[in-house]
Amino acid sequence: MVDNDIILGVSEEIQKLCRPTAIILISNKINTSEELVSFKLLVIVDDSCASTSELECAMYMKIDSDVPFDLVLYKQSEWDCLKNEIGTFAWKINNSGVYIYGQRL
């Protein structure tokens, strides 16, 4: 599903808006016709980001998509701290998500 034009288009818009360290596909839903109906992305941003919640709002306002999507944002230091802590959401994503941009470290 990472080669889906809609997901890749949203990923490219995210890259333009905030220059993330990584973008990870967390999940996607398809209908019985094999069409994408929604998806969720995790975005890892630099620690210099003043407010991930404000950035998240800005991205929702500026990114247009024909398919609904959700975003989860982590600062790099948060991600580094939580991605290896068994049981955390970050750990689950790190072990099951698909990197669209950046690389697994």
Image: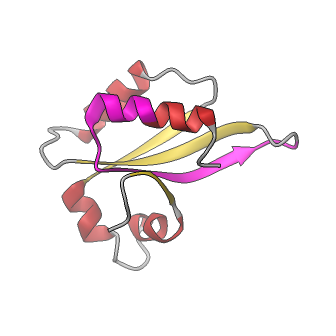
User: Where 54 falls versus 79 (above or below)?
Assistant: above
Is residue 2 placed above or below 5 in the rendered structure? below
Colour mapping used in the image: secondary structure
Q: Residue furthest bottom?
A: 86
Foreground pick, 73 / 13: 13
Q: Is residue 95 above or below residue 69?
A: below
Most extreme residue toward the right, as rendered?
Answer: 32
Q: Can residue 22 be found in the magenta stretch? A: yes
Q: Of 19 and 95, which appears nearest the observer? A: 19
Residue 10 position within the rendered picture, expressed as x and y whole percent measured from the top left = 49, 32
Figure check: 33 above or below 91: above
Q: Which residue lies at the image location 63% right of the left edge and 29% below the top edge?
A: 67
For this rendering, which residue is in front, 54 or 18? 18
Give the side of residue 17 with respect to residue 94, left or right: left
Between 55 and 97, the residue placed more toward the observer is: 97
Q: Residue at x 35, y 35 (%)?
A: 15
User: What count of labels does the image hold?
Assistant: 0
Q: Is residue 34 left or right of residue 21?
A: right
As for residue 65 lying within the magenta part, the answer is no
Q: Could you tell me which residue is drawn at 34 percent across and 76 percent down? A: 84
Coordinates of residue 52 in the picture (x, y in percent): 26, 40
Q: Which residues are magenta?
A: 12-32
Q: Residue at image x 36%, y 53%? A: 102
Give percent across and percent down for residue 14.
38, 33
- Residue 105 percent coordinates (x, y): 32, 68
Quarter of the image for residue 59 reads: top left
The quadrant in which residue 91 appears is bottom left
